[in-house]
Image (cartoon, rainbow, N blue to C red):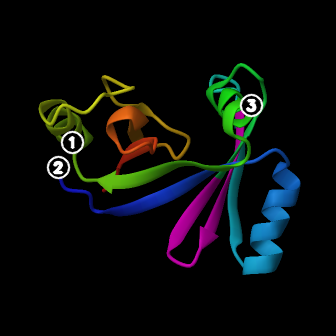
Amino acid sequence: MTLDRIHHIGVAVTDMDESIRLYTSTFGAELVQRTVSETDGLEAAFIRTGEGEVELLRPTREESPVGKFLARRGPGLHHVAYAVTDIDRALEEAREAGLELIDQEPRIGLHGSRIAFLHPRTMGGVLTELVEST
């Protein structure tokens, strides 16, 4: 599987407004988008940092995946997302390599792109997201 580049870094936060302020005023980053996903039980803010992006994630429900993550580990790095050209092929190659897939098939993520997650158990302890990028 060829990873084109790091697409974004996901960071779990407890206070979205304070986290946005930290990135924009301290680092001069730009708030690109802020959205809520009732389906995923989270609020997300996309912060442009030069050529990279940070996705801030705040749970809207305690039982959501991000809510459970915060309860177990507290705020901090949630996942690393890599851009891939062909997500279907990347998932097939991940299966062939023996990686554990969280998403067996791609789904539409908050960026509007097709995404899929690989389990941290087989990714050195890091939740890994693949993002189809054209």
The amino acid pointed to by label 3 is Ala
State the predominant SS element of the stretch in magenta. strand
Q: Quarter-wise, where is residue 44 in the image?
A: top right
| Image coordinates for residue 25, horizontal then vertical, percent | 82, 76
Q: Is residue 119 visible?
A: no
| Image coordinates for residue 94, horizontal then vertical, percent | 21, 37
Residues marked 3 and 1 touching at CB (< 8 Å): no
Q: CA distance from mark 3 to mark 1?
A: 31 Å
Q: Which mark is residue 1?
A: 2
Q: Which region shows up in magenta?
A: 42-55
Residues marked 2 and 1 touching at CB (< 8 Å): yes
Q: Say what secondary structure mark 1 lies in.
A: helix
Relative horizontal placement of residue 10, taking residue 12 as reference (left or right)? left
Q: Which mark is residue 44?
A: none
Query: Which residue ends up furthest to the left in the rendered image?
Result: 96
Q: CA distance from mark 3 to mark 2?
A: 33 Å
Please check the rendered image and state whether residue 50 is part of the magenta-colored stretch, yes or no.
yes
Relative horizontal placement of residue 1, taking residue 31 as reference (left or right)? left
Q: Which mark is residue 90?
A: 1
Point 44% across, 42% down: residue: 125
Q: Say what secondary structure mark 3 lies in.
A: helix
Q: For mark 3, what is the residue?
A: 71
Please check the rendered image and state whether residue 127 is part of the magenta-colored stretch, yes or no.
no
Point 77% across, 72% down: residue: 24
The amino acid pointed to by label 1 is Ala
Whichever of callouts 2 and 1 sits on the residue coming sooner in the sequence is: 2
Whichever of callouts 3 and 1 sits on the residue coming sooner in the sequence is: 3
Rendered view: 40 above or below 33: above
Q: Residues within 10 Å of mark 3 (few under 14, many from 20)?
A: few
The amino acid pointed to by label 2 is Met
Q: CA distance from mark 2 to mark 1?
A: 6 Å
Q: Say what secondary structure mark 2 lies in.
A: loop
